[in-house]
Image (tube, helix red, strand yellow):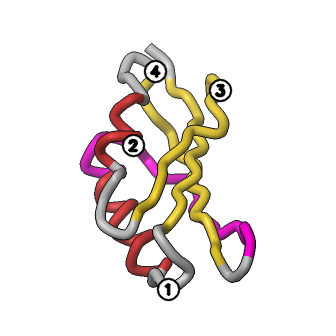
Amino acid sequence: MGIVAVKIKIMPESPDVDLTQLREKLEEKINSLGGKINSAEEEPIAFGLNAIIITLAWPEEKSTDIFESELQIEDVSSVQIIDYRRAFG
């Protein structure tokens, strides 16, 4: 089957969470699930709170429901898929 591009928004529990460490944990978890990360960046939300936006390549035949359960790790408040599209090339 094909590959899809998935963009995930991860909200930390508070502005005090170390986003560098959290991003490293999330990247390890995604790689272990079979995803290939293309980019990871921070997006300001409000009052010093930043979300982590991860864009990754994911096998189309695998369900994306796994993200919402497997990425709900320590210091993560919520996980949301904000974009899903078929990748070409």
Q: Is residue 88 visible?
A: no
Label 1 sits on what residue type? Answer: Asp
Mark 2 vs mark 3: which is more N-terminal? 2
Which residue is label 2 attached to? 35
Q: Secondary structure at mark 4?
A: loop
Q: Secondary structure at mark 2?
A: loop
Q: Is the residue 58 above or below the residue 80 in the image?
A: above
Mark 4 vs mark 3: which is more N-terminal? 4
Q: Secondary structure at mark 1?
A: loop
Give the alpha-carbon distance from disc 4 to disc 3, as whole Å: 10 Å
Which residue is label 4 attached to? 60
Q: Which numbered disc covers residue 85?
A: 3
Tell me if 78 is positioned left or right of 69 in this view. right
Q: Magenta stretch: dominant SS?
A: strand
Q: Which numbered disc covers residue 16?
A: 1
Give the alpha-carbon distance from disc 2 to disc 4, as whole Å: 11 Å
Label 2 sits on what residue type? Answer: Gly
Q: Residue at x 64, y 72 (%)?
A: 50
Give the alpha-carbon distance from disc 4 to disc 1, as whole Å: 35 Å
Q: Residue furthest left?
A: 32
Q: Residue at x 43, y 29 (%)?
A: 64
Q: Which numbered disc covers residue 32?
A: none
Tell me if 35 is positioned left or right of 48 in this view. left
